[in-house]
Image (cartoon, grey):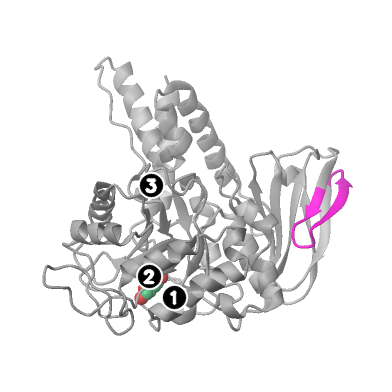
Amino acid sequence: MLFYPILSGYLFLQDHFVRNNLPILTETSRGGRYSHQAAAIFRTRRLYWRFVRKHTSVRELHRSCPIAMNTVFRSCVARLSITVLGLGLISAPAMCVENGLARTPPIGWNSWMVFDLNINEKLIRSMADALVASGMRDAGYDYLVVDAGWKAKQRGAKGELIADPTKFPSGMKALAAYVHTRGLKFGMYTDAGSEDCDSGAPGSLGHEEQDAATFASWGVDFVKEDWCHTEGVNAREAYRKMSDAIRKTDRPMVFSMCEWGDNHPWLWAAEVANMWRTTGDSKACWDCGRETKDKPGGYPRGWTLILDAQPALRQYAGPGHWNDPDLLVAGVKGVPIEESRANFSLWSILAAPLFAGIDPRSMSPEVADIFLNKEVIAVDQDPAGVEGERVAKAGDHEVWARPLRNKDMAVVLFNRSGRAARISVSWKELGHQQGEALTVRDLWKHKDLGSYNSEYSVVVPSHGVVMVRIGIGR
Ligand code: GLA
């Protein structure tokens, strides 16, 4: 009988941490492992899960919608408490958007990082061609997303969205058709407020049904909805409106929320969207943009600062609904190759949507090697859909790990320091026994490294990674 109140207490604590943006994972000052409280919270979560699996009848819900974990826990605990009290009432379970899409994190290309507002139909067509010619489409990058900069400054006579007639004279339907002929899916951008973020074009506020219907009629497969000019707008209601409007069209469209984490979307967004941004924009720099006055943590900010905001969110992601730490900065002008490899590897450990922000027409061979690395992409796209996490940190040396469906672990040894350093991962950190023989494969060198018994240790370049797959060997 004491079980439920204790679990509820932990749940409350966890919610409190998440809602107030407190770090759930605290680390010891010795730079070692998670603290005892953090470990206890994680153990309790696992307990919750075991309990939920065993006792609830909404099997499909939590198999496909673990985000709603908190909500499921809450509803589960509430339901059981009520049953225990003999009231015979059943609380409604939380539902996922469940449009059958994004069973693995969406992967593709987005225009914003490289072209800003400077886009037009000729350019976008050449991007579609380059995604095919570069081999990116065949490696899995199947969404081409046109971000801000496509809309005309005014709606049409019937209130409909129209494309900028100078930049997109043939219209978006023709462009979508072109993209489709290249074997790609077509994504578009709008905003939940009265105006888009940077272009001054109209947002979708008050026009959700009309705009979703317009997108569907153009053959759109992916809708990104931003969060500018939303003073007084309730995020949850606004994104639900667009989500319902999209569902009403009957056209399968991935719904990508871009609300920057302001309203803790991980707590509720799986009910409406397939992915949600967890932070402000990622900048193509290591850790710049630390502070701005209106956004603690900086806006936009360097990609390692974005990374630091992710570990506490892993339990909210899963097939159909993903945490989105923003576009990849890998390969973007000015980002060194080691950092690019690190960004790509860590985003894959995070089960992040992988959206390239490069110009695919002019990739150097080193950058192409990153984007076409099928072994790393396979980690990102692992069908189990479990987001990875940091399992060890000693100063600037970190180990990130992600469990994969075949029971292997994908592991990234990450060196944030200014000089090359030896970093180790122990089998214990991966949940294995010391002494167990495990095979190691280097995913950047594409090389089997043999069998190890207690740890794997390697020199990692400054600001770089070594990424390996560790398993029992088959
Ligand atoms: C915001 C979003 C970005 C991008 C721009 C476009 O900053 O967070 O991802 O869409 O708007 O203006």
Residue denoted by label 3: 270
Alpha-carbon span between mark 3 and mark 1: 30 Å
Depth check: give the residue in front, 344 or 370. 370
Instruction: Give the residue type that dot 2 points to.
Output: Leu
For residue 32, what is the image quadrant? bottom right
SS state under label 2:
helix
Whether the residues at callouts 2 and 1 have beta carbons within 8 Å, the answer is yes
Depth check: give the residue in front, 310 or 438. 438
Say if residue 52 shows up in the picture. yes
The image shows residue 76, relative to residue 114, as above or below, that is above
Alpha-carbon span between mark 3 and mark 2: 30 Å
Q: Quadrant of the N terminus?
A: top left
* Magenta span contains residue 443: yes
Q: Residue at x 75, y 57 (%)?
A: 443
Residue denoted by label 2: 175
SS state under label 1:
helix
Alpha-carbon span between mark 2 and mark 1: 8 Å
Instruction: Magenta stretch: give its range.
Output: 440-454
Depth check: give the residue in front, 448 or 421. 448
Residue denoted by label 1: 124
- Give percent across and percent down for residue 437: 85, 40
Closer to viewer: mark 3 or mark 1: 1
SS state under label 3:
helix
